[in-house]
Image: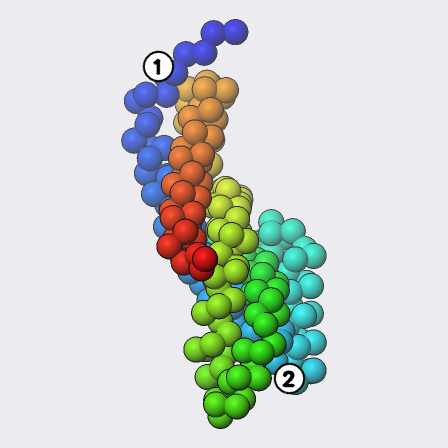
Amino acid sequence: MTLDFSAIVPYLHMLLTGAKVTIQASFLSVLFGALLGIFVGALRVVPLAPVRSIAATYIYIIRGTPLLIQLFLIYFGLPSLGLNLPAFTAGIIGLSINSSGYVGEIVRGGIEAVPKGQWEASKVLGLSYLKTMRFIILPQAIRNMLPAIGNEFVTLIKESSLLSTLAITELTMVGQQVRSVTYASFETFIVVGIIYLVLTSVTSFSLQYVEKKWKVS
């Protein structure tokens, strides 16, 4: 079989436009997912058992159900309750919530990895729980969590391809449109795959750089 990418060249600008939407969706989902995940992860270690149970149940449900079903519930299910969301907004919310479940568990593990002596020293200094968490525990925990969080960010970029099921014109959806016009299925999705590889590689290298800068000898 001979590959011919000449039919794809006139549509490269469309694929790059789709890649921009993918980058926007991934960035917003990473941002909101990380913030929500840190909050949920912090709740997993609070002294109050009912709060820990609620956070644990949230993570259990999010991690135990497919992302695609979560997207469908938000985009197709919420209108039955009177809440209609634009496709892009619904996609960002779905990706963010899904990511927060995994980030929350990563945060919990990172916090519990901080030596207990740090908590005891904070009590001796008279710091409140919130100040201890904000200024002492989380800064140390985040260093430990960077590799795992980096993997989650890369995974989220790839999972953003599911936004095509909501008719969002991100990279995968544009790839399907180009394929339907050119009939060059193999060549089209090779190019789409290369673009995803570039996005995930740039993200991985950037996070590795940050990780080295934060590494404590």
Quarter of the view holding residue 22: top left
The vertical placement of 128 against 37, above or below, is: below
Question: Which quarter of the picture shows residue 199?
Answer: top left
In front: label 2 or label 1: 2
- Which mark, residue 6? 1
Going by the numbered disc 1, the residue's amino acid type is Ser
Q: Earlier in the sequence, mark 2 or mark 1?
A: 1
* Image vertical order of residue 172 relative to residue 141, above or below: above
Left or right of residue 68: residue 212? left
**Which residue is painted at 41% across and 51% down in the image?**
212
Q: Dot 1, how many residues are within 10 Å of its Cα: few (below 14), some (14-19), or many (20+)?
A: few
Image quarter where the C terminus lies is bottom left
Check contact, mark 2 vs mark 1: CB within 8 A.
no
Q: Is residue 14 visible?
A: yes
Residue closer to the observer: 64 or 202: 202
Residue at the image position 48 percent from the left and 26 percent from the top: 189
**What label does residue 80 carry, if any?**
none
Task: Please provide percent x and percent y for residue 84.
Answer: 48, 63
Which residue is disc 2 drawn over?
47
Q: Secondary structure under badge 2? A: loop
Residue at x-position 60% and y-position 52%: 67
Taking 68 as reference, is 60 above or below it? Answer: below
Quarter of the image for residue 170 reads top left
Q: Position of residue 177 (x, y in %)?
A: 43, 30
* SS category of the residue bearing label 1: loop
In this rendered view, identify the residue nearer to me: 121 or 110: 121
x, y percentage for residue 117? 58, 78
Q: Residue furthest top?
A: 1
The three-letter amino acid code for the residue at tag 2 is: Pro
